[in-house]
Amino acid sequence: MTHKVFIDGDVGTTGLQIRERLERRADIQLIRVDPSLRKDVNARVAAFAEADVGILCLPDPAAEEIVAACDAQGVSARIIDASTAHRIHPAWTFGLPELAPGQREAVASAARVSNPGCWSTSAIALLRPLVDAGVIAADADIAISGVSGYSGGGKSMIEEFEAGTAQGSFLYGATQSHKHLPEIVAYGRLSKPPVFVPSVGQYAQGMAVAVQLTLSPKEQARAAEALRDHYAASAFIAIVEAEAHQPRVNPQALNGTNRLELSVQGNPQTGATALIAVLDNLGKGASGAAVQNLNLMLGLDETTGL
Ligand SMILES: NC(=O)C1=CN([C@@H]2O[C@H](COP(=O)(O)OP(=O)(O)OC[C@H]3O[C@@H](n4cnc5c(N)ncnc54)[C@H](OP(=O)(O)O)[C@@H]3O)[C@@H](O)[C@H]2O)C=CC1
Ligand SMILES: CC(=O)N[C@@H](CCC(=O)OP(=O)(O)O)C(=O)O
């Protein structure tokens, strides 16, 4: 049996990587629109009407526009949205199957799934099990930093770095209005936003993220245990020994995979704690995650083709 999938935005960074993963599969038939019509709303709505699942790999306004057009024309295609547009929308299911018990089943049966952001995937994967286990208080003082390859910024940032016009690595988001903060608060079950200062490095792909807070030595040990318990049966998320991410955390270590590695590090004497995540921004941070969600929505093993 083949499943029909339409990728809206399949020449962009995320869409192209999803297409490459799906083109290798005999169980998936990709629906394509004529390249000259790739921004034509009617042509794309027709493609959604034919698809079992459509995947949006578009800027937020374009994602909102095409969902509204599908709704207006009565097209009831199941949709995965890789943009930020619907991440905390109550009618959309958050596409992090490992979030909490029941989330995998919720994704599998959902009509609309929002694929998480790359930074938020890391932060939520670290925080949510610890908040649920009572190791971290919802109102804890938390800081998040990290480094991403420039492909995280899509085509325009890739062009900037490849043309040599980017002036090197940089921090951003210091005004604390990064677009991933709402989903980190909502799905991390926090009662206040963490302080989040990400950065971009002078390499294409891969991320390392550090969630920083104070935990007692006992809480540090409980944190590692709670994460191990939570992800024990996970195909893609693993807790590794702190040594695996020392002394340098390599943001490119998991490139080309859909994996996310977590470790608990810190100084038990002072309580200063760094929860570390490593992932591919175009793997578990975007395209791999979208394929995992697609597999679940199609009733397949979530690891198919990943
Ligand atoms: N890059 C990453 O690591 C991640 C990206 N995302 C999200 O995924 C989405 C896509 O990002 P990314 O692939 O990086 O972005 P890109 O800019 O690389 O690609 C976006 C694509 O959408 C196309 N597009 C823009 N407007 C329209 C429209 N109205 N109709 C049809 N196509 C349109 C663009 O066309 P054109 O080429 O003509 O501009 C481009 O090909 C974004 O919402 C992004 O935030 C999520 C997680 C990680
Ligand atoms: C390096 C870089 O610029 N990264 C992007 C996030 C990439 C991502 O996760 O995308 P969406 O949430 O938009 O889907 C940023 O921080 O805005």
Image (spheres, rainbow, N blue to C red):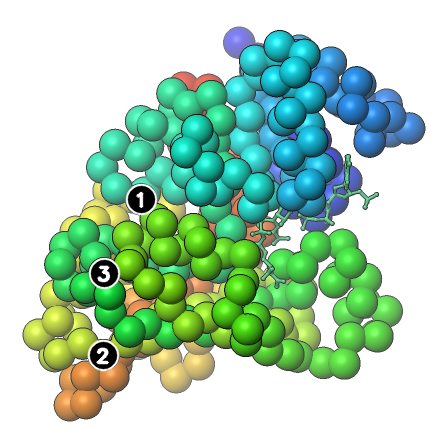
- Considering depth in this image, is 236 or 274 the residue closer to the camera? 274
Kindly give the residue lying farthest to the right in the view shown.
36
Which structural element holds mark 1?
loop
Amino acid on which the number 3 mark rests in the picture: Ala
Rendered image: mark on residue 99:
1
- Considering depth in this image, is 39 or 178 the residue closer to the camera? 178
Instruction: Tell me where residue 254 appears, x and y as whole percent.
Output: 49, 59
Amino acid on which the number 2 mark rests in the picture: Thr
Instruction: Tell me where residue 186 appears, x and y as whole percent.
Output: 36, 50
Ligand 2 within 8 Å of the CB at mark 3? no
Kindly give the residue lying farthest to the left in the view shown.
218
**CA–CA distance between discs 3 and 1?**
16 Å
Q: Earlier in the sequence, mark 3 or mark 2?
A: 3
Ligand 2 within 8 Å of the CB at mark 2? no
Q: From what the image shows, is residue 64 above or below residue 152? A: above
Instruction: Tell me where residue 72 appears, x and y as whole percent.
Output: 65, 16
**What residue sits 78% from the left and 75% below the top?**
166
Report the residue marked by disc 3: 138
Which structural element holds mark 3?
loop
Report crowding for label 2: few under 14, some 14 to 19, many 20 or more residues within 10 A (C-alpha): some
Report the residue marked by disc 2: 214
Q: From what the image shows, is residue 188 above or below residue 222? A: above
On the question of residue 21 being in view, the answer is no
Report crowding for label 1: few under 14, some 14 to 19, many 20 or more residues within 10 A (C-alpha): many
